[in-house]
Image (cartoon, helix red, strand yellow):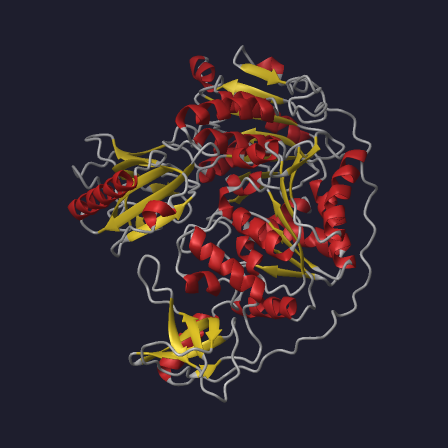
Amino acid sequence: MRHAEVALSLGGPRGAGSLTYRVPDEMPIRPGDLVLVPLQTRLLPGVVVNVVGEAPAFPTKPVEDRVAEDAFVGPLQLTLARWIAAHYRAALFDCLALFLPPGLAARLASAAKKGTWKAPAPPPIPAEPPAHPPPLPGPPLTLQQESAARRIVSAIEQRQHKAFLLHGVTGSGKTHVYFEAVARTLEAGRQAIMLVPEIGLTPATVARFEERFPGRVAVLHSKLSVKQHRLDWERIRRGEADIVIGSRSALFAPVRRPGLVILDEEHDPSYHQPQSPRYHAREVALWWGQLARAPVVLGSATPDVESYFRAERGRYTLLPLPTRFLPGMPPPPTSPPAGGEGNSDRQSRPVSPSPAAGGGGWGVGATSNLPPVTVVDMRAELKAGNTSIFSRELDAAVEQTLARGEQALLFLNRRGTATCVSCRDCGYVLTCRRCDIPVVYHRAGEALVCHRCNRRRPMPDRCPGCAGARIRFFGTGTQRVEQELTARFPSARVIRWDRDTTGKQDAYEALWRAFTNGEADVMVGTQMIAKALDFPRVTLVGVVLADVGLFLPDFRAGERAFQLLAQMAGRGGRGALGGRAIVQTYVPDHYAIQAAAGHDYQAFYQHEMAFRRDHGYPPLGRLVRLLYSGSKEDRCVRETRRVRGRLDQEIARQGIADIQVIGPAPCFAERTRGRFRWALLLRGDRFARVLDRLELSPGWTIDVDPVSLL
C-alpha cells in the first residue's frame, strides 16, 4: 500500500516538517498535490512531498481527499521549496505555501473546519501556449546595451544558467536590455519573471512592458484584490500570460515553462521577506535559475556590495552600462544653473563625477551626462541665520524650476510632520505604550502614530507627565515638507508619495499617473520615489536631509544611505531638459555622501569593503541572527543566555574555530507590540554544524543572512 509524506503547518520555530499518511487505493496521488488529511480531530491542508510503496513501522491514517486533479506544486517548485526550508531553516509547509494560489491554504483550513469544503474544478491547461501578437520593436540599442543583451540572449538560447550583474548608471537603459532578453525568452516559447522591489513600481513597469508585449503581461503582488490576484495567477498557470511582473512574491508564480528571471534594483532590502519563511528573493532566484537552466539578471545602478563582490570573483558575469541612454540629449552643465550660486556661501559645493583610470567613477567609462550634485552644509546655513528646512540653494532652485514649468522631486526618508513630541515644561517625550519609542505627529488626521506597530491616538491637550500645556513638535517628516513647501510656494501643485498616501488599492498608479501627466509640479516622498521611477520632466532633485539612517547601529547603514542618495540623484535629468540634484546634510564629508554626490560607486565600494574586511562582515563572512521575543524582559534575558550557553558548549565540543557568537543583547527596537526582543548573532560560515543540534523553544526566530540587525 502506498504512503504519502505530507507537509503540514503545525507551528513552532520550524514547524514539524511532514507526517506520513496512508493513500487509499482508488486515489491517484503524486508529489506536489494539495490534500486534506486528518490530525487529531481536525482536517488540515497539506502538500504531498513524497510517495513511497513501503509501509512504515507505525499505524497511519488515510489521506481524506485530494484538492484538485492537477498538482499545484511542480517538481521544480518542490525542489526549490525544500532548498528554501533547509537554507533558511523554515517550516517546509510555509515554503510550499509560497507557490499556492493566494489564500487557498487558509480557505481550505477554514472550510474543512466548518465541513463545507468542496473540491474546486481545476482550470484547463492548454497543451500549447496561446497565440499572441508579435512584440513591438524597441528603439535601437547602444553598443553597450547590445553587448550586454547579447551575453544574456546567448545563455537563453543555450538553456544555460548564468547569473548576470547588469551594473548601469541611473538612466542607462537597463530596461531596454531587459526587453531584449524577455523578447528572446518568449521567442523560445518560455516564460519570464520580472521582479521590482516595491509594489509602487509595478504600474510604470507594467505600462512599459504592456506597450512592448501587448496582452502577455500578468501582475502579482499583495495589494491586488483577491479576485484579481487569482485571475492573473490562473492566467500564468494556463500559459496565457508569459511575462510575470511583481514584487518578491511574483518569483513563486506558477510558470510552467521557466526561461528567465530579472531582479531590477537588486540591491534593495525589500527583496528580503521579514516574516517566515525569511528568504531573500535574490538567493532564491539564483537557485530557481539553476533548477530551470535559465539565466538570472540582477540589475542596479548601486549593486549590493555582496553582489559586486561575487561579480569580481567570477560568480556573476558583470555587464557594465557606464553612460546614460538619452538619445539627442547634450551633456548637463558641470556647475549649478545661474541663480544658485548667488545664494550660496562656502557650504555649497558642486560635485562632478570623479574620474578614474577607466575614465569615470564607475571604472568603466565616462559618466559626464549624469546630473551634477551640489552638497549643502546645513551647519553653515544655521550660522548664516537660516533655520528653514530648505537651504537657500534648494529654495532658489525650486523657485527656478517652478518658474520654468518643470518638475521637482523632494526626498526625505521619514513620514509624518514631527518625529518627536515633547513637553517644554518637564521634558516628557510622548512614546508608544507598546513599543517604547517616540510617537510621530501626523498633521493629516491630527494623530500620534507609532511607526513600529501603527497604533494611533489623538494629540493630548495636556502633558501626561506634568499636565502642562506647552507641548511642542520637533523633527521633520514628509508631511511637514509638503506643508512648508505649500506655504512657501502657494501656486505649486504638490503631491506626496509615502506609506500614508498609498494605503488604498490603486493609490500607487494614481500618484504615478498624476505626476507623469503633469498634474503636479513637485512630488515629496520617502524611499518609494528613489527607485526605478522615470520622470523625464524632473529637472531638480532635492534631498531634504541626507543624514536619516546614516548612523544607525547596523553595518549596512552606510551602504543603505549611499544607495538611496545615488538612486535619488539619478531621478533627475532624464530628459532633454537636463537636471541637477541638491543634497542637504550636516556631515558633508561622510564617505557615503561624497561617493553618492560624485556618482562614484567604485569609491564607495572600496571604502566599504575595507570596513567589512576589518570586521568580518558579509561578503567576507556570513551572519545568522537568533531573535527571541517575550512579554517579560527577564524571561528574554534568561532564555537568550541559556541558548548562548548551549551554543558555546556545542562549538567547544566540536572544536569549531570559525563561528563566533555575539550577545545576547537587546535589539535596537527593544520592545515592539508589547513584546521585548533580545538577540544573538552568529558570525562565520556553515552554521548547520551547531544549529542542527540546537533546540529552540517557542518565541525564537532564525534569520539566515539578515539584511538588517535592527
| Left or right placement of residue 295 versus residue 9 in this view | right
Name the one closer to the observer, 651 or 148. Answer: 651
Please provide percent x and percent y for residue 605: 55, 26
Q: Nearer the viewer, residue 338 or 698?
A: 698
Q: Position of residue 44 (x, y in %)?
A: 38, 76
Please tell me in which quadrant of the rendered image residue 373 appears.
Answer: top right
Q: Residue at x 17, y 38 (%)?
A: 465
User: Residue 20 in the image: x percent, y percent?
Assistant: 38, 74
Instruction: Say whether residue 223 is visible.
Output: no
Q: Please identify the quarter of the rendering in which residue 232 is found.
A: bottom right
Is residue 549 depicted above or below 653 in this figure?
A: above
Q: Please state the horizontal and vertical placement of residue 561, each as a whole percent of the image.
A: 49, 31
Q: Quadrant of residue 429?
A: top left
Query: What residue is at 52 percent from the left and 19 percent from the top?
Result: 376
Q: From what the image shows, is residue 636 above or below residue 222? A: above
Is 633 displayed left or right of 400 in the figure?
left
- Look at 46% across and 75% down and name the residue there: 52
| Residue 361 seen in the current view | yes
- Residue 387 position (above or below residue 82): above
Residue furthest to the bottom in view is 26
